Image (spheres, rainbow, N blue to C red):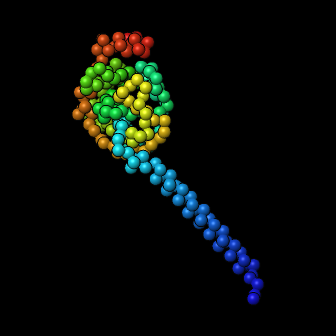
Amino acid sequence: MQKPSVRQRLIKKEVEMSRRQISRMKLLLENWRGYLKEQEEPCAEATEFVWHGSKTGGIKMFEPRQAHDAGGGEGQSEKAVYAAYDPNFAIAMGLTEPDENGDEDKFIDHEKKPLQLVLIKGKIRENQKIYLYKLPKQLFEQVPGNENEALSKVGMRPCEVKELNVGDYLNLVRIGTEEDQAYWNKHTGGSE
């Protein structure tokens, strides 16, 4: 048997290295597919859902963010993804925007049925869109003391999104009265 030449040995070594690289790439691809499947599974497994209303369409991934709630109740100012059990509650949260000074103060009147968002400062987003995201309920827990809201400390992909017209949901928002302003001031320490 003839001994392989230096060139043949180099070619054989390069082929072996290429095979190992391909194996590593296949493993990496397989792991990536597994990760993507894990991200989609909560929706596939879900039988119940919660809702998140947003002015932003096309959200591919929800990540926990720091909340700042005027009520100051337990669980209402967490770094979390917030959602509502009632789609109307979620829709109400996306009906308004800051005014020309960048101010937006609002709260939900839980006693009013159906509930209403009370706008203290800001403006109603007339003739615009709102996006209602459907999220898997099993990733959420109820906000303590608030039967309307849920929070999740983990990121997730939305299961579905609906594009809605703000004008179709104006019954869910009202401009604050003097009484509403007094309530706001009492709970936030504000004055106006």
* Placement of 53 over or under 40, stated as above or below: above
Q: Residue at x 39, y 42 (%)?
A: 136
In-image side of 161 versus 72 (left or right) = left
Q: Would you say 12 lies left or right of 151 here?
A: right
Residue 32's x, y, as percent? Answer: 52, 55
Which part of the image, by quadrant, shows the N terminus? bottom right
Is residue 185 toward the left or the right of residue 172 in the image?
right
Question: In the picture, which quadrant includes the C terminus?
Answer: top left
Q: Is residue 154 above or below residue 1?
A: above
* Position of residue 49 measured from the top left corner of the image (x, y, whole percent): 35, 40
Figure check: 128 above or below 187: below
The quadrant holding residue 186 is top left
Is residue 136 visible in the rendered image? The answer is: yes
Residue at 46% over, 53% down: 37
Q: Is residue 82 left or right of residue 178?
A: right
Q: Is residue 95 visible to us here?
A: no
Q: Point out residue 26 in the picture as x, y percentages from the top left corner.
A: 55, 63
User: Image quarter for residue 184?
Assistant: top left
Instruction: Tell me which residue sits at (30%, 41%) in the image.
Output: 163
Looking at the image, the residue that sits furthest to the bottom is 1
In which quadrant of the rendered view does residue 178 lie? top left
> Number of labelled discs?
0
Please tell me which residue lies in front, 69 or 126. Answer: 69
The location of residue 141, given as percent across then percent down, is 43, 33
Which residue is located at x 69 percent, y 73 percent?
13
